Image: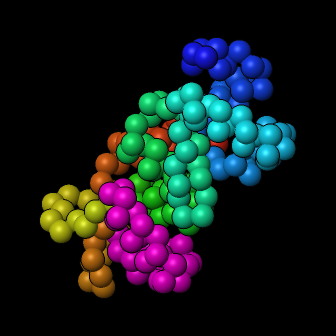
């Protein structure tokens, strides 16, 4: 059976289209949003994976689904974390204030430093953020005080590619903020 034939089934076509519009959702989220029993949905997703129309990416304890060759590795990786509320809060804060530190994020987001460090480590490991050792120019939103970029109490961090981050949050705003 060809890839095109795989989408003749109405249910599979709906699943494929939904994943295309809402990449990075996990099985339970897809099941709820589509109103399809998990086991039935999993059967169809596995079929679409076998036909190389959908890919499944493992993120901690969840598998998340994307349309094959649709958005690329960097954006898929970013979407994995953008769907986790604390990681999303960190990313959006860093997008608005350009550079900051673990301690400033912890205070600003009212989360424990341990929680922030856990997510920062994951974001660093996945090359979404990077150390900002030499930053000549800061741009930050008036929403955040200038002390958000004070480096006196920790390593300065910034988004590795704020353009990609901005694109993802603009394109998938409705699905990320729900």
Q: Is the magenta stretch mostly helix, strand or loop?
A: helix
| Residue 128 versus residue 105 in the image, above or below | above
| Residue 147 versus residue 93 in the image, above or below | below
Q: In this view, does 161 lie to the left or right of 77?
A: left
Give whichever of 177, 84 is nearer the camera: 84
Figure quadrant of residue 6: top right
Total marks shown come to 0
Give whichever of 142, 109 is nearer the camera: 109
Figure quadrant of residue 8: top right
Q: How far from the left and from the top, in percent, is residue 35?
A: 84, 39
* Span shown in magenta: 99-128
* Residue 125 visible in the shown view: yes
Residue at (37%, 59%) from the top-left corner? Answer: 126
Q: How far from the left and from the top, in percent, is residue 75?
A: 43, 43
Q: How far from the left and from the top, in percent, is residue 165?
A: 41, 46
Q: In this view, does 140 lie to the left or right of 136?
A: right
Residue at (52%, 78%) from the top-left corner? Answer: 115
Give whichever of 81, 164 is nearer the camera: 81
Figure quadrant of residue 102: bottom left
Does the magenta run of residues contain 164?
no
Residue at (53%, 39%) from the top-left corner? Answer: 55
Give whichever of 172, 14 is nearer the camera: 14
Q: How far from the left and from the top, in percent, is residue 44?
A: 71, 34
* Residue 139 visible in the shown view: no
| Residue 177 versus residue 103 in the image, above or below | above
Colour treatment of the image: rainbow
Quarter holding the N terminus is top right
Q: Residue furthest front?
A: 1
Does the magenta run of residues contain 125?
yes
């Amino acid at each position: 059976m060809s890839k095109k034939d795989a989408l003749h089934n109405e249910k599979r076509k709906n699943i494929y289209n939904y994943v295309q519009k809402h990449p990075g959702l996990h099985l339970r989220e897809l099941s709820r949003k589509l109103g399809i029993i998990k086991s039935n949905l999993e059967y169809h997703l596995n079929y679409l994976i076998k036909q190389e129309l959908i890919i499944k990416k493992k993120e901690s304890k969840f598998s998340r689904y994307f349309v094959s060759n649709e958005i690329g590795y960097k954006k898929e990786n970013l979407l994995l974390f953008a769907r986790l509320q604390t990681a999303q809060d960190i990313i959006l804060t860093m997008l608005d204030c350009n550079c900051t530190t673990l301690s400033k994020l912890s205070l600003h987001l009212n989360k424990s430093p341990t929680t922030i460090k856990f997510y920062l480590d994951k974001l660093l490991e996945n090359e979404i953020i990077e150390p900002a050792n030499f930053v000549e120019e800061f741009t930050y939103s008036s929403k955040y005080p200038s002390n958000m970029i004070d480096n006196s109490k920790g390593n300065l961090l910034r988004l590795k590619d704020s353009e990609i981050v901005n694109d993802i949050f603009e394109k998938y705003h409705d699905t990320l903020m729900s």
